Image: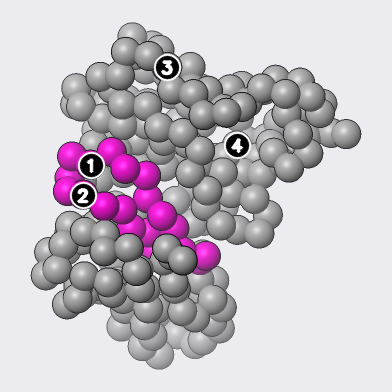
Amino acid sequence: AQKITQTQPGMFVQEKEAVTLDCTYDTSDPSYGLFWYKQPSSGEMIFLIYQGSYDQQNATEGRYSLNFQKARKSANLVISASQLGDSAMYFCAMKWASKIIFGSGTRLSIRP
Amino acid sequence: EAQVTQNPRYLITVTGKKLTVTCSQNMNHEYMSWYRQDPGLGLRQIYYSMNVEATDKGDVPEGYKVSRKEKRNFPLILESPSPNQTSLYFCASRPGGSNSNQPQHFGDGTRLSIL
């Protein structure tokens, strides 16, 4: 069965430092996609970055990059030079066929 | 403006009183989905729809119904709500079929409290 795990319920990081949010997944399907979403305290879900299982390169979007290690089944989100506005819940999600499952989330707090 | 619109945003109601949460998207997306978000559990998929008249169960469909009579609308129906359905609900849509890797666009959420 497909499974996705975020092992860090909460993290505190100093402003301007880089931060890595962990995500591991389990699937026997060779075709899948991995997403990261941000949920600020206002509640909306904001798409950050996507990685496909067949993509050769790690995805990057501005300050966000995805450290995709297929053999280890991990898809960690790296945020470079963190900002106060990065304080939010972050969800990793895995899509296969028509279905999608989300991890339990990591609450990131950036200290000034 | 491209958006997914949910109504109501907040609702407090009582056990057993049927309610409907509406969801509408203006992006001509084929795929629509409903999720509930509970603390420590992330988002869990309730139902999804690949296109008009094509709906399927997600991971937690019990106690919910959906319909997709038009492409833009995907209402969530609670026929007999119970307190364990108190949650934050999100509707989402994306273009393409099952193989699409497009990200989902989410509505702003509906906070339901069932007393």
Residue matched to label 3: A58
Which is nearer the eye, A47 or A23? A47
* Three-letter code for the amino acid on which mark 1 is drawn: Ser
Chain hosting mark 3: A
> Which residue does the image show at 37% across and 27% down from the upper left?
A51
> Are the residues under badges 3 and 4 in a single subunit?
yes
> Which residue does the image show at 35% across and 68% down from the upper left?
B25
Which residue is farthest front?
A: B1
Which residue is farthest bottom?
A: B17
Q: Residues within 10 Å of mark 1 (few under 14, many from 20)?
A: some
* Three-letter code for the amino acid on which mark 2 is drawn: Gly
Separation (CA) of disc 4 from disc 1 = 26 Å
> Which residue does the image show at 46% across and 33% down from the upper left?
A49
* In the displayed structure image, the side of residue B114 where residue B81 appears, left or right: left
* Three-letter code for the amino acid on which mark 4 is drawn: Thr
> Are the residues under badges 3 and 2 in a single subunit?
no
State the image quarter where residue A108 is shown.
top right
Separation (CA) of disc 3 from disc 2 = 23 Å
Magenta segment: B91-109
Which is nearer the eye, A7 or A56? A56
- Labels 3 and 4 touching (C-beta < 8 A): no
Depth check, mark 2 against mark 4: the one in front is: 2
Residue matched to label 1: B100
In the rendered image of this protein, does residue B18 appear above or below residue A53? below
Residue B111 point in image, percent of width and height? 54, 71
Residue matched to label 4: A106
Q: Residues within 10 Å of mark 2 (few under 14, many from 20)?
A: some
First along the sequence among labels 3 and 4: 3
Chain hosting mark 2: B
